[in-house]
Image (cartoon, grey):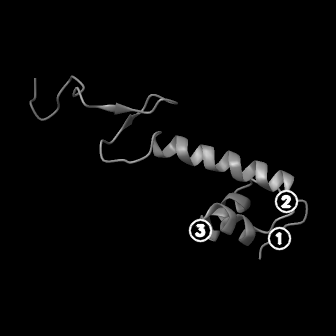
Amino acid sequence: MNPQFPTEEPSNARFCPQCGQRVPRTYRGDTCPACEEEALYQQVKAYIETHNATATQVAQEFHIPLAQVKDWIENGYFVYRNTPWH
């Protein structure tokens, strides 16, 4: 057995309650970063479906970078009725 790679989880290990992935002890969120991003994505998607908002307005509403919203749009995660890019 190599002492550099312990086979048991430390007693103070944290795990995401949604997906079960290990979360770094220093991470401040309740869920892992991937689950937090998925939750944010679902909130943004619901917002876009119910509001006639531009990408800029979405970024401001959720306090996220405009580039992230545009990336989601360009990759087909969101479909605008009329593609507002401003």
The image quadrant of residue 52 is bottom right
Which label number is shown at residue 80? 2
How far is the residue under mark 3 from the one under mark 1?
16 Å
Q: Nearer the viewer, mark 2 or mark 3?
A: 3
> Residue 31: horizontal and vertical position, in percent?
47, 39
Label 2 packing within 10 angstroms: few (<14), some (14-19), many (20+): some
Q: Amino acid at mark 2?
A: Tyr
Question: In the figure, is residue 38 to the left or right of 2?
Answer: right
How far is the residue under mark 1 from the one under mark 2?
7 Å
**Which quadrant is the N terminus positioned in?**
top left
Q: Amino acid at mark 3?
A: Pro
Q: Which residue is mark 1?
A: 84
Residue occupying the point 12% across, 35% down = 4
Which label number is shown at residue 65? 3
Query: Vertically, is 6 above or below 56?
Result: above
Q: Amino acid at mark 1?
A: Pro
> Residue 5: horizontal and vertical position, in percent?
17, 32
Residue occupying the point 80% across, 56% down = 48
Query: Vertically, is 15 above or below 49?
Result: above
User: Is label 3 in a helix, a strand or a loop?
Assistant: loop
Query: Vertically, is 33 above or below 81?
Result: above
Question: In the figure, is residue 25 to the left or right of 34?
Answer: left
Which label number is shown at residue 24? none
Label 3 packing within 10 angstroms: few (<14), some (14-19), many (20+): some
- For the residues labelled 2 and 3, say whether their Cβ atoms are less than 8 Å apart: no
How far is the residue under mark 2 from the one under mark 3?
18 Å
Question: In the figure, is residue 86 to the left or right of 22?
Answer: right
Residue occupying the point 74% across, 69% down = 57
**Sequence-first tag of 3 and 1:** 3
